Structures are given as C-alpha cells and as structure tokens.
Image (tube, rainbow, N blue to C red):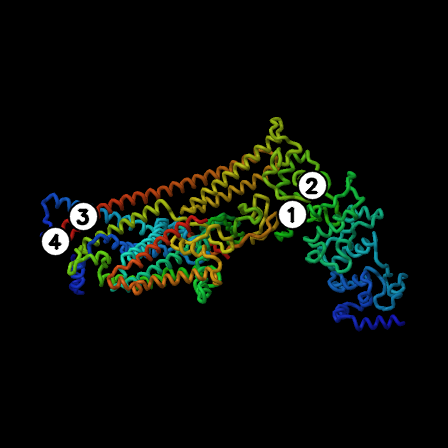
C-alpha cells in the first residue's frame, strides 16, 4: 500500500487505480474460456524465464550444442528441472494457444470490434509455432536434426519462393551448424522481439475493449440489460492465479513422469532414423502432406498441399472480415461448421499421424 | 481495498478467524511455492565445479603434480587422455586411446615412451608409432598452462 | 650401308626430344636409339622401359653395364661384338639362369661399390638367394624359378619404396602369385613331404585380415609374402619357427604361447589355429571344443577327463560373461545418461573393462584358465563399480521424480487454498 502511495505522489496513478477498481469481467455460462488467454501468457512468461536461465549455459554451435545441454542436465544444479520445464512448457504453451484460438473461434469473439485482436492473436499463434520449430533444433540431437531437415524441406516446397525460403531458413542448402545459429537467433532474439510487441498490442486491445461476450448470450439479452460483472481485482485475478497454479501443477506432473531425454548427438551423415516426424503440433499438417498423391492435375502434390495450408492460414487471419453475419451480430452457423471441421481434422490427423509408423 | 460490508456483512468472530486462517494458509502457500521456484533457480545460477562442457578443452590436473619423465591419464569429456612431461620439462598431451584396438595407453618411464599393454604397441613422445600393431599415431592435443605457481593448471584443448 | 641411312632417318624422324634429354645427361647410347625404334616389341620394350623410369639409368648406368657391347657405334655387328675387342665388356646378350644372378650380383654384392650409391643397402642378397628354394632349384638347372629380374624387373627397375614397383608392399603378393597361383607353371613342384604345391595362396591371402590391413587400412606394416617367407632367402617357415615368424609382430602372443603346452605339441605353432595365408579376424567363437570352435580336432567338449576342453570352456565362459556384463552395463549407463545423469566417469571405466576383454583374449594363448580368470575378475570388478554408479543414477532419477511429486502435492494444496479464497471473496462481494 505504501509503495503505491509513494508512486501515486510522483506519477498520479489515479487513472490506473480507477481502472483497476472499476474493471469488470462479464459473468455468464461460458466465462471459463476467459482464462485460456491468461494461461497462455503465463506459460510464455515461464518460457522467457526458463529460456533466459538456459541461455546462460547453452552453446549454439554444432560441436557444442548437444554437450552444453548434456552439461546443463547432468552438471548444473537443477539444470534437469529447468530444461524439463522449458521443454514441457513449450508443448503446453502451444496446446493452450490452440485451445485459446479454438475457443475464440467457436465463440466468435473475433467479430467487430475485435478484429485486430484476432489478427494479432493469429500472428501470435504462428509465432508460437515458430518458437516451437526453432527451439526444437537447439539440443542438436538426432531426432531434432532430421525433423528440422524434413520441416525446412516442406518450407522449400512452396512454389516460387520455396527454394529461397529454404536457403534462408537453413543458412545454406543443408541443415548444418549455420542452421543452428540462425534458429538460435530466431528463437532468442527475433521471435521474442516480435512477440513482445504483438503481445503488448494484443493485451492493450483486450484491456481497452474488455472481454467479449459470446454471440449467443449477447443475443439473449433484452435491450438495455447488462450482464452482471465480476470485479477484475480481486475476484477475477485470483481465479487467473488459480488457473496458473493449475498450469504449474500440469508442468510439474509432466516433468516428473515424462522427463525429457537427451537423445543421441546429431550426425549429418548418419542415415535418417525410421519413423522420423515433427513435434505433435505439426503432425496433422505433416501427415496430410504425406498422404497427398505425388501429382494432382499435373502439379506436384506437396506443392499444392503447402499452398493450400498457406491459403488456410491466410483465411484464418482474415476470418473477422469474412464473417459478415457475426460482425452484424447475427448467428453464423457456416463459420461454426468450419470451426468444428477444423478441430475434428486437427485432432484426427494428429492422432492418425502419431500412430502411423 | 474497498471493503463492501453492505452486501455481505461479516458474521462475527468465527468468520473473521476463518478468513485470517485462510489468508495465512494462502500466504504460506504462495511463499513456499515462491521458495520452491527461487531455490532451484538460485542454485542453477551457481557455476558448477567442472566449469564448462569438456568438448573443446579439459583440465589435466595441476602442473606441479606432473613430474619430469612422467605421465598421467586425465578425462577429456568421456574419453581418456594422457598428459606427459618430458625429461626437459615440456608438457604434452595426446588421446590415450590406442589406435589399434582402443585400449588405454600408459607412460613407460624406463624407456620414456608411451606403451599399450594390450598388444605391446609403442609410441614415442610425439605420439608417433615406434613398433607394434597400432596403425596410426596418437591424436595430439594443444597444451596450455593456466595460472601460476603451485595452483597452475594444465589445460588441454583439441588441436 | 642402306640400313645405316634408314637407321639414321628413323633416328631423326622418330626420336622424341626426351630421348635427347636423357642422352644428353648420360653418355651417347646407341643401344637405346636403335632398339627403341625396332618393330619387334621383345627388343624394343626393354629399351623404352629403361629409358623411362629406371633406377639404374638415373644413377648413370647404361645398357652395356649389364649386357656389355659397344654403345658408341650404330653398326650392329660392332655394337654386339662378343669378342671383347670393341669394348671393355664383351656383349653377352640376354642373361639367363645363373647368369642373371651373376649379372646383378656383380654390383649388388660388392660392398664398396654399393656404399657409394646406397650405404644402408644390404649386399648379401645373392648369398641369401642361394639358400632359398628358388636358388637351390636354379642351381640344378631349373630355369622356371624366380630370379632377380622376375620380381624386380630388369629394365624399368624401380625402388622398393616406389608404389609402382612390383615389390612395393601392396604389389608383392601379386608378383609372387604371377607364378605361384598359376597351376600349369607350378605343376610338378612338391612340398618336402611330397604333396603337391598349392596355388591358392593368393586367394587365401586376399581373404585374410593382413591383406585387408595392407590394402584397405593403408597399414604398410602389415605382412605380405616376403615378411613371413623372407625376401631373397625365401623358404616357407619351417617346423618350429612359425611362432617366431608370427612373433616378429605379434610379440605378446608369442610370449604367452611359447611356454605353453601347445607350443610343445604343435608342429606349426600359430598356424595350427589361425592358418597361414587365410588368417582371418579371430573371434571368441573359435575358443570352444565343439563346433564352430577350433579346439575340436584334439579336444572334445563334455569329456570331463579332457583338461583342455575344460580349460577352453572356463576361459570362454569367463570371456562371454564379461562381454555380456559390459553390454548390460553400457545399456544401463546409456539410459541413465540419456535421462540426465552425469556418466562420463562410467564411460571411461567401461572402456577399461573392454580393455580387460582384449587382455583376456591375449592371455588365453597361454592356455592357463587361472590367468584368464584373474583378468576377467579385474574386468568384472570394474563393471560392478559401474553398475553401482548406474543404480545410483537410477535412484537419483527416482529422487527427482519424487521431489517433483512432492512439489506437485504442494501446488495442488495451494490450488485448493486459492479456490477456497475465491469462494470467500465471492461471498464478500461481487460473488458469482
């Protein structure tokens, strides 16, 4: 309390104090989905924190990366814990980001006036996938090396800009120490910088506009009626903290029962191990591309697939502007169906891709 | 904090005790989880005794412990190395893995040579094969002395 | 007269400049100029060979130093004068039989002469040759055997260290095999005991581990024909000397084998078990008194009175057990290391244990199970220590897991406390 008064004397925190005191969160049947964004943000914070700790010991060179991770895990006190948390938190982060995305998609919170919140959010989702892809290579073990080879190979399949993109990503024709350096730069500098800016914007939008109420519930309100509000501070924030503790519990459980392995050091000249595949969050896309026939209507299947996924990503980014009905406050069953199909496809193909050997 | 007693008036001492008890419980919970995070993190920051991963270089012990015309085995990562001091004081280091069948070599003081007990391979103090089955010379390392006086340390690096 | 013109014409038209260069350095040599233009290859080839790369020519020797005759005239009769009037050494044509040896030995058995050209080179080759099978047969008139020229060449002789020389280390076997692998040529020759001389040596040798070392592993110290049979005094190693021959390189094995019981029994020493030409990479399977082991010709597994069979079984079991224990230990350490335990010391120790296996395989050549057991025991002790460290690693991993489970409990406790607090705050105000 005294600290706040001290600051208030100097910086006039009356707007802030007013904002916090008056800020409310609408209460309704679907409010449980509100927590997902905060949980995702919390996990991002965990990643930044554990990531900074790791980079005190990690060495981004092909000859030392694996050994430095081995060093962290075997010699540095609690290194195994920090590394395990970082690896599992990454997976949880992507999972929660997708859950957050789907909940917003289903509840149509992207509709006017929250279009830019959605666009920044989609970009953040892609950035999280970029973090996952770039970070996966850093331990420089066999699985990571070949998964990166396959993944960047797919990027190279994009027509016209593909080969250039592949070289840009790999730092050359093949996956080498140059790739490791690039991915490291991406993972600890470039992506964090862009993410920080986008997260700031995303949060600013949310704070400015308040929480969106699902369309179905909004439509059931009588004119002039407002939903009951829960004070943000302390009621909602305490629930947020509860959600974060649940996330911590999940992390502890995963790290305890499924510790992350070191693997064997990457050897560029070793044969590709059988059943190589990317991390689970790329599995659906990967398996789809694998299933595509070699040629469709004369065009290479993989090219078509990659372009299709690109178009899908673009479609998703522009959903708020395409869903006219939701923007007008009307029911939009078409987009609900798209969301359902998307979720079913992702879940199904992830499972199929996992069990296909 | 605004205390809205009008909506739900405090119902007496037991509620107050329960409230404070829960607050205390929460405080204990938060503090202990904070400590459970802070402790590993602070321990993590303390540099481990081995310094850094022994990929490019490793320590081969104190320089003063290596007498002239003697040798010692040291650990380079997970592989053995041999450090020798010649009769005129020069310190040299090689891999201790015999190039024949991977046995660990040793220093022979009476002939000032490096010898492999398995099949009698002999190397000179430059790592070159003198006699016996080894097909290739011993890989040579770069030797530096770090520090001064009694605590001076022999640091061996890959060539 | 006419042929003189023709000869001269050919000389100007067909002689490449290099011949002039070669001749300019040495004295004029009409042998070369004439013979290299002859259509008959048998007469022309020696000249061109000698003119190109030849170690004798490079040191200033010429055709006449071996063949005699007059090198300064292009008159055929005078050049080939056999009376000695034309030149210091009369022309003697192509030497054959003992004359070949005499021709080479004229210089190569002369210490003072050789000292001026190659001080370290030996001068007893001819004497050695006389003791060899080739030399002895030549002495009784068999001209099919190898002479100096058969292996070294006569014209176009290269140093032994020259990779193109027929007696460079990797070429020796093929050179010997040019006669010894030819059944027609070797027909009629027998071993001392009367059995026919085999012609499979080259094929056998090419299947051997020595040949692999020579040709694939670039190990020029690996033996080829001359290393075991001798260079000039070539004789198959005799009864009793086999262990010495192998022991020139395989010292430790000879040291173990020599005092052992098998050395007193075996005629052929190492060759009894390892073969002579087709020496294969030895395996642990060889050590058994039942197939595929090689103790079977003399020993019978299962025969309790057969001390040798019992010894073989003891030693083999010891080695196999240590191998298995090392493999199991390696797996444990790899798994524990993969999960995040420091295991570099254990890696080193397992390397030591593997060395004990190598030492055990050496020691078995003394055929004393007690000695092999001692080494196996050393190795087992090392593996025991490694296993203990491995188990400590497993315990550490379990401890970590338990620690996390405890903190999970604490976290869930806090979750419950927060949930209660939320309920309490909701009751106080804004509760929903």
Mark toward the start of the polypeptide (3 vs 2): 2
Instruction: Please name which of the two marks, 4 or 1, marks the residue nearer to the observer.
Output: 4
Contact between labelled residues 1 and 3, with CB atoms less than 8 Å apart: no
Give the alpha-carbon distance from disc 3 to disc 2, as whole Å. 95 Å
Q: Mark 4 vs mark 1: same chain?
A: no
Look at discs 3 and 2 and give the one toward the viewer: 3
Position of residue C9 measured from the top left corner of the image (x, y, whole percent)? 83, 73
Judged from the image, the secondary structure of the residue bearing numbered disc 2 is helix
Closer to us: mark 4 or mark 2?
4
Q: Toward the viewer: A258 or C430?
A: C430
Query: Considering only order in the chain, which callout, 1 or 3, is on the residue closer to the N terminus?
Result: 1
Residue for badge 1: C210
Subunit bearing disc 3: C
Could you give the CA–CA distance between mark 3 and mark 1, rounded to whole angstroms? 84 Å
User: How would you rate the neighbour count of disc 2 (Cα within 10 Å): few for under 14, some for 14-19, many for 20 or more?
Assistant: many
Which residue lies at the image location 42% right of the left edge and 44% below the top edge? C336
Find disc 3 in the rendering and name its residue.
C423
Cα–Cα gap, marks 4 and 3? 16 Å
**Marks 2 & 1 on one chain:** yes
Q: Badge 2 is on which residue?
A: C242
- CA distance separating discs 4 and 1: 94 Å
Please say if the residues under marks 3 and 2 sit with CB atoms less than 8 Å apart.
no
Q: Which mark is residue B3?
A: 4
Q: Nearer the viewer, residue A173 or A140?
A: A173
Q: Place residue A169 in its image quadrant.
A: bottom left
């Amino acid at each position: 309390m005294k600290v706040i008064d001290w600051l208030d004397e100097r910086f006039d925190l009356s707007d802030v104090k007013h904002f916090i005191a008056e800020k409310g969160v609408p209460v309704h049947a679907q409010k449980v989905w509100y927590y997902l964004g905060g949980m995702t943000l919390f996990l991002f914070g965990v990643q930044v924190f554990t990531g900074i700790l790791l980079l005190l010991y990690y060495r981004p060179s092909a000859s030392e990366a694996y050994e430095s991770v081995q060093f962290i895990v075997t010699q540095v006190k609690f290194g195994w814990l920090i590394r395990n948390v970082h690896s599992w938190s990454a997976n949880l982060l992507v999972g929660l980001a997708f859950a957050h995305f789907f909940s917003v998609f289903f509840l149509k919170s992207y509709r006017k006036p929250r279009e830019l919140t959605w666009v920044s959010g989609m970009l953040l989702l892609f950035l999280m996938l970029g973090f996952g892809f770039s970070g996966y290579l850093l331990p420089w073990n066999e699985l990571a090396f070949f998964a990166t080879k396959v993944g960047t190979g797919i990027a190279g399949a994009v027509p016209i800009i593909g080969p250039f993109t592949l070289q840009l990503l790999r730092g050359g024709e093949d996956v080498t120490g140059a790739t490791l350096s690039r991915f490291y730069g991406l993972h600890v500098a470039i992506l964090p910088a862009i993410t920080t800016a986008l997260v700031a914007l995303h949060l600013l939008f949310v704070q400015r506009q308040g929480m969106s109420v699902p369309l179905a519930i909004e439509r059931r309100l009588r004119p002039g009626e407002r939903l009951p509000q829960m004070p943000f501070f302390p009621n909602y924030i305490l629930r947020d903290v509860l959600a974060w503790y649940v996330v911590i519990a999940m992390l502890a459980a995963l790290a305890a029962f499924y510790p992350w392995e070191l693997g064997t050091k990457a050897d560029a000249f070793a044969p590709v191990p059988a059943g190589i595949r990317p991390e689970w969050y790329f599995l659906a896309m990967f398996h789809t591309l694998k299933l595509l026939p070699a040629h469709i209507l004369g065009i290479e299947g993989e090219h078509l697939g990659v372009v299709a996924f690109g178009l899908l990503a673009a479609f998703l980014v522009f959903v708020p502007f395409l869903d006219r009905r939701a923007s007008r406050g009307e029911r939009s069953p078409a987009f609900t169906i798209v969301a359902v199909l998307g979720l079913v496809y992702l879940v199904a193909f992830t499972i199929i891709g996992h069990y296909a050997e | 904090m605004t205390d809205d007693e009008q909506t739900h008036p405090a119902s007496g001492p037991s509620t107050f005790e329960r409230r404070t008890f829960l607050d205390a419980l929460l405080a204990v919970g938060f503090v202990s989880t904070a400590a459970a995070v802070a402790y590993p993190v602070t321990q993590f920051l303390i540099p481990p005794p081995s310094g850094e991963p022994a990929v490019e270089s490793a320590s081969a012990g104190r320089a003063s412990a290596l007498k002239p015309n003697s040798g010692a085995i040291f650990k380079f990562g997970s592989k053995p190395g041999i450090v020798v001091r010649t009769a005129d004081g020069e310190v040299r280091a090689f891999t201790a893995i015999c190039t024949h069948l991977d046995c660990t070599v040793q220093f022979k003081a009476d002939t000032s040579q490096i010898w492999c007990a398995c099949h009698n391979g002999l190397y000179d103090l430059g790592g070159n094969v003198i006699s016996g089955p080894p097909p290739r010379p011993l890989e040579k390392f770069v030797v530096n002395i770090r520090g001064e006086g009694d605590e001076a340390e022999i640091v061996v690096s890959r060539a | 007269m006419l042929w003189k013109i023709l000869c001269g014409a050919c000389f100007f038209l067909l002689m490449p400049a290099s011949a002039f260069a070669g001749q300019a350095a040495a004295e004029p040599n009409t042998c070369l100029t004439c013979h290299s233009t002859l259509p008959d290859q048998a007469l022309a080839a020696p000249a061109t060979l000698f003119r190109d790369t030849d170690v004798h020519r490079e040191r200033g020797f010429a055709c006449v130093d071996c063949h005699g005759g007059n090198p300064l005239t292009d008159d055929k009769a005078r050049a080939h004068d056999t009376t000695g009037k034309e030149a210091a050494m009369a022309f003697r044509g192509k030497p054959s039989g003992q004359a070949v040896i005499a021709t080479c030995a004229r210089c190569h058995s002369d210490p003072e002469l050789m000292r001026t050209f190659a001080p370290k080179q030996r001068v007893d080759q001819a004497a050695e040759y006389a003791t060899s099978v080739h030399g002895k047969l030549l002495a009784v008139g068999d001209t099919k055997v190898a002479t100096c020229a058969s292996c070294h060449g006569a014209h176009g002789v290269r140093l032994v260290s020259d990779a193109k020389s027929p007696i460079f280390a990797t070429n020796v076997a093929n050179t010997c095999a040019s006669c010894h692998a030819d059944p027609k040529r070797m027909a009629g020759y027998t071993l001392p005991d009367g059995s026919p001389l085999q012609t499979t040596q080259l094929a056998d040798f090419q299947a051997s581990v020595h040949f692999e070392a020579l040709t694939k592993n670039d190990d020029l110290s690996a033996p080829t024909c001359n290393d075991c049979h001798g260079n000039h005094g070539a004789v198959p190693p005799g009864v009793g000397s086999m262990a010495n021959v192998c022991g020139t390189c395989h010292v430790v094995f000879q040291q173990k084998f020599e005092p052992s019981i098998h050395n007193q029994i075996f005629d052929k020493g190492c060759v009894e078990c390892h073969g002579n030409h087709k020496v294969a990479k030895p395996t642990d399977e060889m050590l058994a008194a039942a197939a595929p082991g090689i103790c079977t010709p003399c020993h019978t597994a299962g025969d309790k009175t057969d001390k040798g069979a019992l010894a073989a079984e003891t030693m083999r079991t010891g080695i196999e057990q240590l191998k298995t224990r090392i493999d199991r230990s390696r797996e444990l350490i790899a798994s524990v290391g993969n999960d995040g335990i420091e295991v570099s010391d254990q890696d080193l120790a397992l390397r030591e244990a593997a060395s004990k296996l190598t030492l055990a395989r050496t020691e078995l050549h003394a055929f004393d199970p007690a000695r092999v057991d001692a080494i196996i025991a050393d190795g087992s002790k090392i593996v025991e220590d490694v296993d203990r460290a491995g188990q400590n690693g497993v315990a550490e991993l379990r401890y970590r897991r338990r620690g996390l489970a405890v903190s999970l409990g604490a976290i869930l406790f806090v979750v419950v406390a927060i949930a209660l607090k939320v309920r309490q705050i909701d009751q106080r105000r804004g509760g929903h």
